[in-house]
Amino acid sequence: MEAMGILLLLSLALFSFSGIYRCLLQIDCSQFKDSGTYCTRESNPHCGDDGKTYGNLCTFCKAIERTRGKLRLHHMGKC
């Protein structure tokens, strides 16, 4: 019974941490909202939850715009 309690607490801790981690991965795309903004070739990979690697924040934000907000950041770096 005690082991079950410890397992439950660890599960809750992991679940809570994953939620906090997701909050940290939110992206601010406000600087790229203008349709006249062109993306540079700067390399700063962003991995989308679609499994694609986007070259930088700008290209990732443009992809979010194309998907009408459905795309989310999975993690920083290449997929």
Image (cartoon, rainbow, N blue to C red):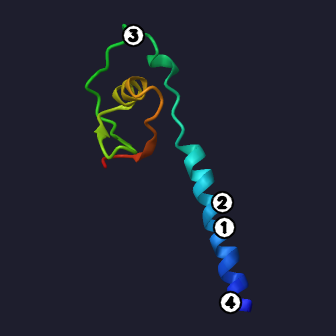
What's the mark number on residue 37? Answer: none
Q: Quadrant of residue 16?
A: bottom right
Q: Are marks 3 and 1 in contact (CB under 8 Å)?
A: no
- Disc 4: which residue: 3
What's the CA distance linking mark 2 and mark 1?
5 Å
Mark 4 neighbour density, 10 Å: few (under 14) some (14–19) many (20 or more): few
Badge 3: residue crowd in 10 Å (few <14, some 14–19, many ≥20): few
In primary-sequence order, the first of circles 2 and 4 is: 4
Q: What residue is drawn where x is 61% and y is 53%?
A: 19
Which of marks 2 and 3 precedes in the sequence? 2
Q: Which residue is mark 3?
A: 35
Circle 4 SS class: helix
Disc 1 crowd, CA 10 A, few/some/many (<14, 14-19, 20+): few
**Labels 3 and 4: the sequence-earlier one:** 4
Task: Specify the amino acid type for callout 3.
Answer: Ser
Q: What residue type is disc 1 on?
A: Ala
